[in-house]
Amino acid sequence: MRNLTVDLAALAASALTLAGCSVGALNLGSTSLKGQPLSAAITRLGSPEEQQTIDGRKTYTWIRGNATYECRIRATMAGDIIDTYEGFGDVGVCNQYGALSGGLKGYLD
């Protein structure tokens, strides 16, 4: 019984250590492109897949990830500067680009 208790304690400590690492890996700091020119987004993300004008403001959309883990990243411009930068879709994929999704628009603004 003592060995089982020691093994469970070691397993729990390992799980907590790994959980801490995975949470830390998702926090990439302020990588938001808000306030940057469109060229900064294109340098980081490549050419956008979609471009449209909504209420006179240009909006660019990039699609990253795959069919299972996809993130749609949207940058809305205020003139030549990115006014809003947000992601919709898989949190892990979106967070890689500083565009956390899951209903937390502007999380890294």
Image (tube, helix red, strand yellow):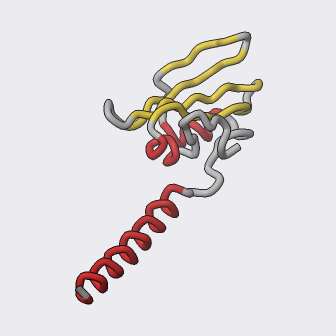
Q: Is residue 89 above or below residue 23?
A: above
Q: Is residue 52 left or right of residue 17?
A: right
Q: Nearer the viewer, residue 75 or 38?
A: 75
Q: Nearer the viewer, residue 87 or 104?
A: 104
Q: Position of residue 104 (x, y in %)?
A: 62, 38
The residue sitting at 36% across, 75% down in the picture is 14
Q: Position of residue 35 (x, y in %)?
A: 74, 39
Q: Is residue 16 above or below residue 46?
A: below
Residue 109 sits in which quadrant? top right
Q: Position of residue 96 (x, y in %)?
A: 49, 48
Q: Quadrant of the N terminus?
A: bottom left
The residue sitting at 61% across, 50% down in the picture is 31
- For the view shown, which residue lies furthest in the front direction? 1
Residue 100 sits in which quadrant? top right
Q: How many marks?
A: 0
Q: Position of residue 52 (x, y in %)?
A: 59, 14
The residue sitting at 50% across, 19% down in the picture is 50
Q: Is residue 99 above or below residue 53?
A: below
- For the view shown, which residue lies furthest in the bottom direction? 2
Q: Is residue 57 left or right of residue 63?
A: right
